[in-house]
Image: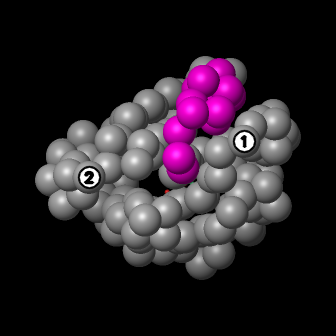
Amino acid sequence: MKLSIINGPNLNLLGAREPSIYGAQSFVDYLEELKAKYPQVEFDYFQSNVEGELIDQLHKVGFSSDGIILNAAAYTHTSVGLGDAIKAIDTSVIEVHISNTFAREDFRHTSYITPNAKGLILGFGLDSYRLAVESFL
Ligand code: DQA
């Protein structure tokens, strides 16, 4: 099984960025743990701070990958383009968030991803990504 993980803006700073909200581990380290736990899964990982590059990556993997795990970060709350890209591709997308966005500011309660996603997992820290992997398995 081939799973694609796509992370949006500022998630390259995981481990250093607001650790009280997002934890102290970098995503690259966490990804190594995921790869070790699921040797049967072929993971590809992409992170960008640029909205159009995230859309391009959805187009790139969205007809060949068996599942996409997307944390669009702040673009979740603003990007019609990302929502449309999910509609345009064949592969199912699971939306994940590290924090419980519904327990935070009102602007984080809107998602342009959720209506087009297969499901939503949030609030479990980095474990949200593992739960998304389990769901695809
Ligand atoms: C986030 C939640 C978003 O509201 C925020 O902009 C992020 C990270 C999360 O994983 O909790 O950058 O997607």
Q: Amino acid at mark 2?
A: Gln
> Going from the N terminus, do you reach mark 2 or mark 1 first?
2
Q: Is residue 91 left or right of residue 2?
A: right
- What is the total number of numbered labels drawn onto the structure image? 2
Q: Which residues are magenta?
A: 55-67
From the viewer's perspective, is 35 left or right of 80?
left
- SS category of the residue bearing label 1: loop
Residue located farthest toward the bottom when viewing the structure as drawn:
103
Measure how far apart labels 2 and 1 are at the Cα level.
Answer: 22 Å
Above or below, comparing residue 84 to residue 102 in the picture: above
Which quadrant of the structure image shows residue 131? bottom left
- Residue 6, horizontal then vertical, whole percent: 50, 40
Q: Residue at x 36, y 64 (%)?
A: 130
Image spot of residue 14 (x, y percent)? 32, 46
Mark 1 closeness class: few <14, some 14–19, many ≥20 residues within 10 Å: some
Which sits in the foreground, 106 or 5?
5
Inspect the magenta stretch and tell me whether residue 58 lies in it: yes
Query: For the residue carrying disc 2, how many other residues have a C-alpha within 10 Å: few (<14), some (14-19), or many (20+)?
Result: few
Q: Is residue 122 left or right of residue 18?
A: right
Q: Secondary structure at mark 2?
A: loop
Q: On residue 90, which mark appears?
A: 1
Circle 2 residue: 40
In this rendering, the answer to whether 40 lies above or below 88 is below
Residue 44, image quadrant: top left
Q: Position of residue 127 (x, y in %)?
A: 34, 68
